[in-house]
């Protein structure tokens, strides 16, 4: 097979994957006490994160959350209802803004991000993680199938935290996907949950790794955030 024929096959395969992502998706986070279950497609490309040579990850150390020095191409978001400040790439758009979660996606919807503050499953990262995974494993509501979960202890905002790597596929599809999540306890019995989701291709996984690291480094929890003036 010639180089031109191989390139044509790769291009056609990429087009099919893009069509499937546009047609199907899975909820980001569900099972909360508010009953608000987002159904955005898992996705959004981070324009500012260039893929590195390896998609493998190692449990990160506690990033120093900062109120300044955002990377170029990112902006800070204040979320009064979540009592948090976080960062997203400039080109991303908000899909859901509720009193317990804020969901975002990239322009091409190949990456998705969510920040949640909830007390449905308990006040510790371990309890919240267990409750969320139980909901995910109910494929009839989560639309997630064949979950393979790896849990890493880590630190976030000076506290013990849990970092999850979840390999799965959307119900009815064979394409592998990956979700990375962070659970860290806040005040008043709430647990914060930071999530990124994408298709499990080498380029997207490398981008997801960088997105997750940047978002963690600029996440500020339990903030007295004032609503923006109307």
Image: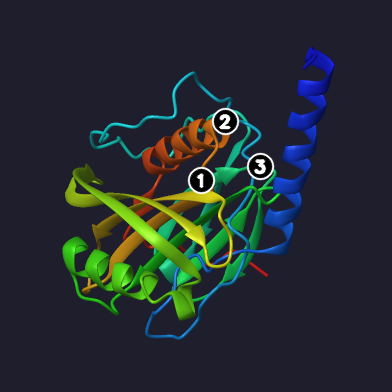
Name the residue located 73 percent from the left edge and 63 percent from the top edge: 23
Name the residue located 27 percent from the left edge and 34 percent from the top edge: 60
The percent coordinates of residue 111 (x first, y second) are: 59, 48
Q: Quadrant of the N terminus?
A: top right
Is the residue under label 1 in contact with that under label 2 (CB below 8 Å)? no
Is the residue under label 3 in contact with that under label 2 (CB below 8 Å)? no
Q: Quadrant of the C terminus?
A: bottom right
**Residue 116, visible in the rendered structure:** yes
Alpha-carbon distance for marks 2 and 1? 22 Å
Figure check: 165 above or below 3: below
Name the residue located 47 percent from the left edge and 80 percent from the top edge: 140
User: Is residue 188 found left or right of 194 in the rendered image?
Assistant: left
**Residue 107, visible in the rendered structure:** no
Q: Secondary structure at mark 3?
A: loop
Q: Secondary structure at mark 1?
A: strand
Q: Earlier in the sequence, mark 2 or mark 1?
A: 1
Q: Nearer the viewer, mark 2 or mark 1?
A: 2
Residue sitting at the far front: 1
Report the residue marked by disc 1.
Answer: 87
Checking the image for residue 203, the label placed there is 2
Q: Nearer the viewer, mark 2 or mark 3?
A: 2
Figure check: 92 above or below 52: below
The percent coordinates of residue 25 (x first, y second) are: 61, 64
Report the residue marked by disc 3.
Answer: 90
Alpha-carbon distance for marks 1 and 3? 9 Å
Closer to us: 97 or 1 = 1
Is the residue under label 3 in contact with that under label 1 (CB below 8 Å)? no
Query: Which class describes the residues within 10 Å of circle 2: few (<14), some (14-19), or many (20+)?
Result: some
Q: Secondary structure at mark 2?
A: helix
């Amino acid at each position: 097979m010639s180089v031109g024929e191989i390139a044509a096959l790769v291009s056609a395969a990429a087009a099919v994957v893009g069509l499937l992502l546009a047609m199907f998706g899975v909820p980001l986070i569900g099972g909360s006490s508010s009953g608000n279950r987002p159904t955005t497609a898992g996705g959004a490309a981070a324009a500012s994160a260039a893929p590195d040579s390896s998609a493998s990850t190692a449990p990160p150390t506690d990033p120093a959350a900062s109120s300044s020095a955002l990377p170029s191409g990112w902006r800070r978001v204040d979320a009064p209802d979540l009592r948090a400040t976080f960062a997203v790439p400039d080109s991303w758009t908000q899909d859901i803004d509720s009193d317990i979660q804020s969901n975002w996606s990239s322009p091409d919807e190949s990456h998705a991000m969510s920040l949640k503050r909830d007390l449905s499953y308990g006040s510790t990262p371990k309890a919240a993680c267990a409750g969320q995974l139980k909901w995910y494993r109910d494929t009839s509501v989560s639309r997630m199938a064949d979950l393979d979960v790896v849990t890493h202890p880590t630190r976030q905002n000076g506290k013990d935290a849990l970092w999850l790597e979840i390999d799965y596929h959307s119900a009815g599809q064979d394409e592998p996907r990956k979700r990375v999540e962070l659970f860290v306890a806040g005040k008043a019995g709430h647990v914060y949950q930071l999530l990124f989701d994408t298709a499990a291709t080498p380029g997207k996984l490398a981008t997801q790794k960088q997105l997750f690291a940047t978002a963690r480094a600029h996440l500020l929890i339990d903030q007295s955030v004032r609503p923006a003036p109307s």
